[in-house]
Amino acid sequence: MTKKNICIRLEGGLAVTPVAFLVQEASKYDSTIYIQVEGKKVNAKSMMGMMSLGLNEGEELEVVADGVDEKEAVCGIEAFLSGK
C-alpha cells in the first residue's frame, strides 16, 4: 500500500471537468485508489464519489493506492493534481 499527502494546485480546484480527468487518470491503473480528506474516503475511479468531495485549490488530501502499480498510480495522480 502506498500513501501520499498531496496539495491541489489546479486553478479553480476540482470542478466537473478536472474531476472527470482525475477519474480518467485513476482508471489507467489496476490498483485500487482512494482519495481521503476530512474523514471521507472515496474511490478515485468514481465520478460521483469524487464530485461529492468538493475539493478546492490549496486543499490537501491523501491518496491511497493498493495493487501492482500503486506507486505509479500515486505518482500519476500527484502529477495531475499538481497541474503538471
Image (spheres, helix red, strand yellow):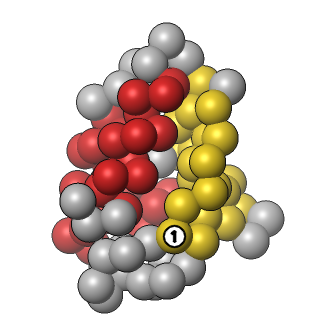
Residue 79, percent across and down? 32, 52
- Can residue 47 be seen by looking at this rendering? yes
**Residue 80 sits in which quadrant?**
bottom left
Depth order, front residue of 61/16:
61
Residue at the image position 61 percent from the left and 48 percent from the top: 4
Instruction: Give the residue at the far bottom of this rendering.
Output: 12
Task: Find disc 1 in the rendering and name its residue.
Answer: 7
> Which amino acid type is shown beneath numbered disc 1?
Cys
| Residue under the point 39% across and 48% down | 77
Residue name at image x 67 percent, y 25 percent: 1
Taking the view exactly as shown, the residue that stands out farthest to the right is 39
Left/right placement of residue 52 relative to residue 2 reads: left
Q: Residue at x 28, y 43 (%)?
A: 25
Residue 31, horizontal then vertical, whole percent: 48, 23
Q: In the rendering, at what x and y percent does residue 81 appear?
A: 36, 62
Residue 15 falls in image quadrant: bottom left
- Label 1's element? strand
Nearer to me, 69 or 34: 69
How far across and down, in percent of the image, does residue 29 sit? 36, 26
- Asked if residue 28 is positioned above or below residue 48 in the image, the reply reads above
Q: Is residue 45 visible?
A: no
Residue 47 vs 43, above or below: the answer is: below
- Structural crowding at the residue carrying mark 1, measured as other residues with C-alpha within 10 Å and reported as few (<14), some (14–19) or many (≥20): some
Q: Nearest the camera: 65 or 51?
A: 65
Q: How many marks?
A: 1
Q: Which corner quadrant holds the C terminus?
A: bottom left
Whether residue 3 sits left or right of residue 76 in the image: it is right
